């Protein structure tokens, strides 16, 4: 079996659902269920014998050690993190705690478990760390895309905390021989993304008649990848990646933010026409401090070495995403009004605070 940390979040949940559709191997999700963890995302696999869930904090090493001893996984796929740049600007402490200390505690638990395995199991074990392209910093308009050898230059507290985690993972391979793998992926979008990130926020606000906030001049560029393409890339890295290596994952879909928002408006105008074009709701707002101008991933290594290529273009993936949000108004409503926390609090106690809207 495999263990998936952060499996109740956006990418983790997509990974879990896809894994259980495609592989006949059980998995255990370990998730603290912060504001970003939503068990609604995993509703389709509740009751599946191959699926297990434990509410636990990755910083709690003893708990992780006990779970590893009990479940005896052949791999850990590590998604758990604080993931929103704007939240890291308002409160960086939680990012250092989960992304740096949490990854360290998880690595220590994994190392202790792995070092006691039989030779064959030790060789086959994998620790797959899910990271971001934001560790490389910001590109100018004409710079080449990030490769695996681009120097790290993180600019936000989020990016710095992920960079620190990446360095720890690298060191655990280099020093102890732990069979680690790292994926550095560009911006994801798709079903179950928390509506504080650009694409789901734009869709939800548009439908509610609210402003569509675009930071600064809207000319910042992100390289978008549909979430299931990322999940497939990770499954491939887990299967065939070389221990100690990092793989850049991206779909060569560079788009300016203003174009992302305008395209969503155009799709909504067609699929859910309103009295006036949705683009009239676009509002330019104060820029994010230290806002990275451009990200772009060169996915040449994963394409060449592992034969991975994305199935979705930005055009097909964005339509699919808008349709998903239109088809799941209850999911959106339960997240937006906080109801998704009610079951968690009944089941586990009110230990995690409800999400607070970010003040701008
Ligand atoms: P998310 O915020 O939607 O989900 C994070 C999950 O981790 C939540 O379920 C949360 O409850 C859980 N979690 C947080 N702190 C925890 C802790 N201390 N212990 C256990 N669980 C904890 O994030 P996401 O967008 O799904 O991102 C997943 C991973 O992918 C992150 O590591 C992120 O850095 C990386 N990543 C994200 C993107 C993106 O565009 N979203 C792109 C590249 C890489
Ligand atoms: P986001 O989804 O927060 O991802 P990241 O900061 O990790 O790239 O933001 C994507 C881009 O959209 C980023 O350049 C910031 C911008 N943005 C807005 O213009 N308005 C918004 O309301 C949000 C949330 C983001």
Image (tube, rainbow, N blue to C red):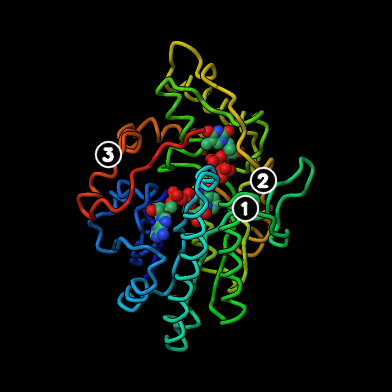
N-term mark: 2 or 1: 1
Quadrant assignment for the N terminus: bottom left
Residue topped by disc 1:
133
Q: Is residue 18 visible?
A: no
Numbered circles on residues, count: 3
Image x and y of residue 359, in percent: 48, 34
Q: Secondary structure at mark 3?
A: loop
Point out which mark residue 295 bears. 2
Q: Is mark 2 within 8 Å of ligand 2?
A: yes
x 52%, y 51%: residue: 92
For label 3, count other residues whose C-alpha is less than 10 Å away and answer few (under 14), some (14-19) or many (20+).
few
**Does the beta carbon of the residue at mark 1 sit less than 8 Å from ligand 1?**
yes
Q: Residues within 10 Å of mark 1 (few under 14, many from 20)?
A: many
Asked whether disc 2 touches disc 1, contact meaning CB atoms under 8 Å apart, the reply is: yes
The structure residue drawn at horizontal position 56% and vertical position 82%, both measured from the top left corner, is: 176
Residue 324: image location, x then y, percent: 40, 36
**Which residue sits at x=60%, y=81%?**
175
- Please tell me which of labels 1 and 3 falls first in the chain: 1
299 or 169, nearer to the observer: 169
- Label 2, label 1: how far apart the Cα atoms are: 7 Å
């Amino acid at each position: 079996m495999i263990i998936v940390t952060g499996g109740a979040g956006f990418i983790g949940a997509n990974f879990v659902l896809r894994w259980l559709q495609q592989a006949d191997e059980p998995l255990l999700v370990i998730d603290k269920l912060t504001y970003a963890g939503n068990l609604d995302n995993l509703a389709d696999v509740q009751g599946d014998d191959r699926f297990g869930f434990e509410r636990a904090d990755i910083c709690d090493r003893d708990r992780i050690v006990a779970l590893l001893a009990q479940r005896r996984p052949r791999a850990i796929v590590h998604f758990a993190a604080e993931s929103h740049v704007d939240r890291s600007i308002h409160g960086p402490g939680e990012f250092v705690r989960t992304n740096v200390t949490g990854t360290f505690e998880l690595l220590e638990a994994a190392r202790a478990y792995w070092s006691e395995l039989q030779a064959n199991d030790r060789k086959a074990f994998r620790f797959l760390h899910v990271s971001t392209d934001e560790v490389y910093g910001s590109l100018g308009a004409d710079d080449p895309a990030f490769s695996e050898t681009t120097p790290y230059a993180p600019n936000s507290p989020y990016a710095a905390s992920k960079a620190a985690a990446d360095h720890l993972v690298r060191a655990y391979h280099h020093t102890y021989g732990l069979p680690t793998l790292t994926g550095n992926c560009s911006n994801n979008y798709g079903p179950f993304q928390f509506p504080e990130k650009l694409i789901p926020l734009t869709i939800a606000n548009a439908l509610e008649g609210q402003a569509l906030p675009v930071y600064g001049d809207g000319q910042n560029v992100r390289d978008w990848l549909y979430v299931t393409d990322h999940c497939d890339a990770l499954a491939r890295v887990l299967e065939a990646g070389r221990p100690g290596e990092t793989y850049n994952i991206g779909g060569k879909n560079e788009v300016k933010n203003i174009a992302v928002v305008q395209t969503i408006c155009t799709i909504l105008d067609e699929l859910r026409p309103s009295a006036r074009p949705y683009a009239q709701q676009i509002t330019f707002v104060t820029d994010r401090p230290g806002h990275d101008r451009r990200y772009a991933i060169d996915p040449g290594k994963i394409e060449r070495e592992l034969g991975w290529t994305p199935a979705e273009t930005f055009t097909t993936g964005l339509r699919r995403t808008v349709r998903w949000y239109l088809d799941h108004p209850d999911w959106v409503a339960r997240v937006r009004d906080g109801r998704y926390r009610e079951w968690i609090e009944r089941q586990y106690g009110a230990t995690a605070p409800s999400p607070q809207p970010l003040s701008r």
